[in-house]
């Protein structure tokens, strides 16, 4: 989708600090980091969010987690990190292209705000 910022990043049409890319997913630094490490892992194909995932998406969804785990180790935060998916505006989703936040490098509280 040409008006989707994450599609534009995936397609190399918008700048981002990309850390990982394959034929299914792309990972890059969040523009507004909420922790010393704050990465976003996104499917290359446009999917607006969790509400749109369905049968057939299992490999891609699994890949998001495998890439997150690998990047957490590479970023030296493997001892403790948080994975977040905001689904819908009420939960704070602001970019409507599915993404997994990988946050680390500081302690996190529970419950989240
Ligand atoms: P969410 O609120 O869960 O939809 O998270 C969207 C995240 O995307 C938010 O942490 C900020 C980040 N973000 C928004 N626009 C850009 C952008 O143009 N580039 C990058 N790298 N991150 C962005």
Image (cartoon, helix red, strand yellow):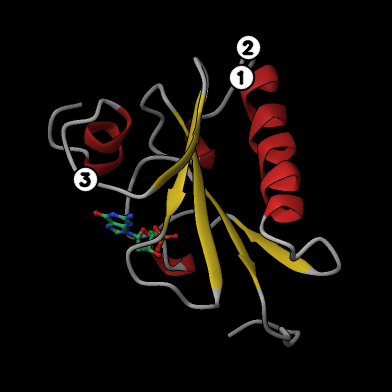
Residue to which mark 2 is pinned: 56
Callout 1 secondary element: loop
Q: Residues within 10 Å of mark 3 (few under 14, many from 20)?
A: few
Q: Nearer the viewer, residue 8 or 36?
A: 36
* Mark seen at residue 98: none
Which residue appears at 23% of the width and 30% of the height?
12
Pointer 3 residue Cβ closer than 8 Å to ligand 1: yes
Q: Residues within 10 Å of mark 1 (few under 14, many from 20)?
A: few
Q: Are marks 2 and 1 in contact (CB under 8 Å)?
A: yes
The span from disc 2 to disc 1 (Cα, nearest Å) is 4 Å
Ligand 1 is found in the corner quadrant, namely bottom left
Q: Is residue 3 left or right of residue 80?
A: left
Picture quadrant where residue 53 is located: top right
Q: Nearer the viewer, residue 96 or 63?
A: 63
Which residue appears at 28% of the width and 32% of the height?
7
Residue 13 x %, y %: 16, 32
Q: Residues within 10 Å of mark 2 (few under 14, many from 20)?
A: few
The answer to whether 34 is drawn above or below residue 71 in the figure is below
- Say whether disc 3 or disc 1 marks the residue closer to the N-terminus: 3
Q: Nearer the viewer, residue 94 or 54?
A: 94
Q: Is residue 95 left or right of residue 85?
A: left
The answer to whether 34 is drawn above or below residue 73 in the figure is below
Residue 84 x %, y %: 62, 60
Residue to which mark 1 is pinned: 57
Picture quadrant where residue 1 is located: top left
Callout 3 secondary element: loop
Which residue appears at 49% of the width and 51% of the height?
40
Residue to which mark 3 is pinned: 15
Residue sitting farthest toward the right: 79
The span from disc 3 to disc 1 (Cα, nearest Å) is 27 Å
How many numbered markers are drawn? 3
Quarter occupied by the C terminus:
bottom right
């Amino acid at each position: 989708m040409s008006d989707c910022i994450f599609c534009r990043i995936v397609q190399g049409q918008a700048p981002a600090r990309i850390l990982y890319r394959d034929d299914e997913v792309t990972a890059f630094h969040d523009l507004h980091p909420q922790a010393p490490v704050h990465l976003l892992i996104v499917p290359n194909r446009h999917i607006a969010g969790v509400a749109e995932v369905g049968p057939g998406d299992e490999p891609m969804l699994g890949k998001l987690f495998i890439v997150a785990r690998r990047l957490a180790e590479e970023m030296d935060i493997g001892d403790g990190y948080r994975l977040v998916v905001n689904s819908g505006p009420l939960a704070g989703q602001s970019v409507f292209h599915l993404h997994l936040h990988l946050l680390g490098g500081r302690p996190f509280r529970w419950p989240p705000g």
